[in-house]
Image (cartoon, grey):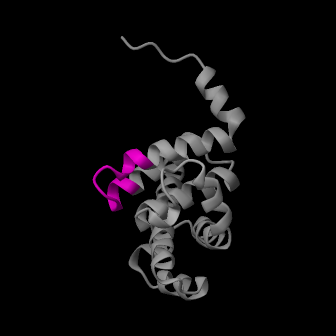
């Protein structure tokens, strides 16, 4: 029973990585979402993706870019256009998932963003992504975040 769950988790992670590549390309080139999507479908990692999640992330982030940037503006220390394209894309993905993928716990969204930033971003970009997505989560998913913060923490021995 654990194998399908692990497989789904890996497919979701792969879909986030491929969506990140597409958003990065979109941020740098401004290419049409359809052209970017077609290019991504030719990449080796595409077959391992949760293709529905990839489509939701890529097309949703591009479609809602202005809204996502507006949400991020309250939590970043500079205009989003001045962020590195990788950090900007990771933050857009995280903000989109926090808003639209309620089935994914907020801590998972933040962790996945941090892992993407560690893998593809600058040296300490993951710390920045962690802080920004934590603040976005507190705004977008107030009840979930408050419940997690009030839950008793396990004792460490």
Residue 46 in the image, given as x and y percentages of width and height: 47, 75
Q: Nearer the viewer, residue 48 or 75?
A: 75
Q: Is residue 1 visible?
A: no
Q: Is residue 92 visible?
A: yes
Instruction: Give the residue drawn at x 56%, y 60%.
Output: 92
* Quarter the N terminus occupies: top right
Up/down of 8 relative to 24, above or below: above
State yes or no: residue 60 in magenta.
Answer: no
Name of the residue lying farthest toward the left: 123
Majority secondary structure of the magenta segment?
helix
Apparent side of residue 73 relative to residue 131 in the rendered image (left or right): right
Residue visible at 58% across and 71% down?
A: 58
Along the line of sight, which residue is nearer the eye, 85 or 93?
85
Quadrant of the drawing holding the C terminus? top left
Residue drawn 61% across the image and 67% down it: 61
State whether residue 102 is above or below residue 90.
Answer: above
Query: Is 81 above or below relative to 112?
Result: below
Percent x, y for residue 113?
47, 52
State yes or no: residue 119 in magenta. Answer: yes
Figure disc tally: 0
Name which residue lies at 39% across and 14% down. Answer: 156
Q: Which residues are magenta?
A: 117-128
- Front residue of 127 and 1: 127
**Relative to residue 139, is residue 89 depicted above or below?**
below
Residue 133 rendering spot, x and y as whole percentages? 53, 46
* Residue closest to the eye, 3 or 86: 86
Q: Position of residue 115 (x, y in %)?
A: 40, 51
């Amino acid at each position: 029973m654990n194998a399908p769950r692990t497989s789904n988790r890996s497919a979701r992670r792969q879909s986030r990585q491929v969506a990140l590549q597409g958003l990065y390309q979109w941020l740098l080139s401004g290419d049409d979402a359809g052209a970017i999507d077609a290019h991504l479908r030719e990449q080796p990692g595409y077959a391992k993706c949760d293709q529905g999640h990839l489509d939701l992330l890529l097309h949703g982030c591009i479609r809602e870019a202005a809204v996502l940037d507006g949400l991020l503006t309250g939590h970043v220390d500079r205009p989003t256009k001045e962020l590195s394209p990788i950090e900007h894309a990771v933050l857009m993905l995280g903000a989109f998932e926090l808003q639209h993928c309620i089935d994914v716990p907020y801590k998972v969204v933040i962790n996945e963003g941090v892992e993407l930033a560690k893998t593809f971003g600058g040296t300490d970009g993951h710390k920045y992504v962690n802080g920004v997505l934590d603040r976005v989560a507190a705004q977008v998913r107030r009840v979930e975040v408050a419940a997690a913060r009030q839950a008793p923490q396990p004792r460490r021995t």
